[in-house]
Image (cartoon, rainbow, N blue to C red):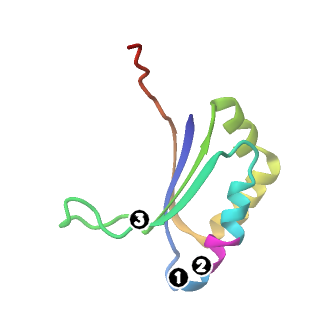
Amino acid sequence: MIRLTVLYNLPPGSDEDAFLRWRLTDHQAANAGIEGVIRTDFARLERRFPADLPLPYRFMTTADWPDRESFEKGFYDPQVQADLTENLTKIADPLFLISEILTETRND
């Protein structure tokens, strides 16, 4: 499984409530509608461990695809990339991480 994780903040002066209304409705539906996506989640980060360190990001989005081929087909689709370019104007300091979820199988 391939997971895209995006950590980000809002630009200074942004209306967080308005952002959340958009992010939890229209944008969540758009993320779930990307070809191949099998799960997508959104979170507001509340604290970090150890607690005495500053929290570098306020929000996190994840999206999962079953394999690399479906990830590349869906995420790198020209329309998805055009939408991403527009949506990046609504956030600040984005960090995109692409990971492969590894699982161990047991042969008992």
Note whether residue 53 is visible. yes
Secondary structure of residue under mark 1: helix
- Give the answer, above or below, for where 19 lies relative to 34: below
Tell me which numbered mark, 3 or 2, is placed earlier along the sequence. 2
Secondary structure of residue under mark 2: helix
| Residue at x-position 38% and y-position 14% | 108
Q: Quadrant of residue 65?
A: top right
Give the residue number, with chain letter if any, for mark 2. Answer: 19
Q: Are marks 3 and 2 in contact (CB under 8 Å)?
A: no
- Give the answer, above or below, for where 58 lies relative to 73: below
Q: Quadrant of residue 104?
A: top left
| Residue at x-position 46% and y-position 29% | 102
Give the residue number, with chain letter if any, for mark 1. Answer: 16
Name the quarter where the N terminus is drawn.
top right
Numbered circle sitting on residue 57: 3
Q: Nearer the viewer, residue 65 or 80?
A: 65
Q: CA distance from mark 3 to mark 1?
A: 14 Å
Count neighbours of disc 3 (C-alpha within 10 A) and say few if under 14, some if 14 to 19, many if 20 or more: many
Tell me which numbered mark, 3 or 1, is placed earlier along the sequence. 1
Note whether residue 15 is visible. no
Count neighbours of disc 1 (C-alpha within 10 A) and say few if under 14, some if 14 to 19, many if 20 or more: few
Q: CA distance from mark 2 to mark 1?
A: 5 Å
Q: Which residues are magenta?
A: 21-25
Q: Nearer the viewer, residue 97 or 2?
A: 2
Q: Quadrant of residue 91?
A: bottom right
